[in-house]
Image: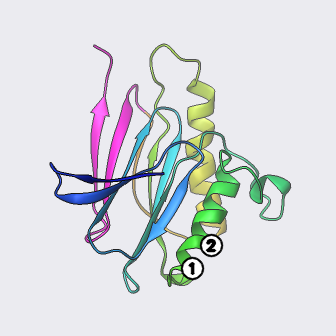
Amino acid sequence: MKKQYDHRLKRMTYEIIAGEYTATSEPDVVLITLLGSCIAVCLIDEESHVVGMNHFMLPGSLDLGSPLSTGDTKYGSASIDMLVREMVSAGAKLINLRAKVFGAGNVVGTFSGGVAGSNAEFAKDYLAALDIPVIAEDLGGNWGRKLYFFSHSGEVFIKRITEG
């Protein structure tokens, strides 16, 4: 994860790439990621003021005890599990978590159509299995997305990235 001060945003930014995740209770940080067919899950606990974001490439297993849910964080199951653990370690409570889910773009020039749809379906199903409600989503379409997740407000701003 790349941490740096962004003079335009006047805040510290944490840039999350595929296979990474982070949680923070810092009040004025922006978590940033760039998505195509991948998924980013943004988690919020409004009571503890802990937020987190991940970025995964492939679904995984809905079986909460499977090897894919405890290993490589390029898989959604492992990525979401590790993010939830880090959120709880930072002071969040599982019962308070709310999710915002983004990505799954069918980006032109790639063969990601099946993966994108599988990623979106998986993320929502896995969060439901963990009893984490999805309160916002922006999934699908023929574009990529750059996300800006503001820790102080829980707001997510999306810049759509299209060809041309």
Quick check: marks 1 and 2 in contact, CB under 8 Å? yes
Mark 2 Cα shell of 10 Å, populated few (<14), some (14-19), many (≥20): some
Q: Amino acid at mark 1?
A: Val
Q: What residue is disc 2 on?
A: 85
Q: In this rendering, would 92 be left or right of 123?
A: left
Q: Amino acid at mark 2?
A: Arg
Q: Which mark is residue 13?
A: none
Residue 133 lies, with reference to residue 75, above or below; the image says below
Residue drawn at 77 percent across, 54 percent down: 71
The segment highlighted magenta reads: 141-164
Tell whether position 163 is magenta: yes
Q: In this rendering, would 24 be left or right of 160?
A: right
Q: Quadrant of residue 95?
A: bottom right
Q: What residue is disc 1 on?
A: 88
Cα distance in 3D space between marks 1 and 2: 5 Å
Residue drawn at 84 percent across, 55 percent down: 67
Image position, residue 39 (x, y; %): 52, 44
Residue drawn at 62 percent across, 32 percent down: 115
Residues 129 and 154: in front is 154
Residue 131 lies, with reference to residue 10, above or below; the image says below
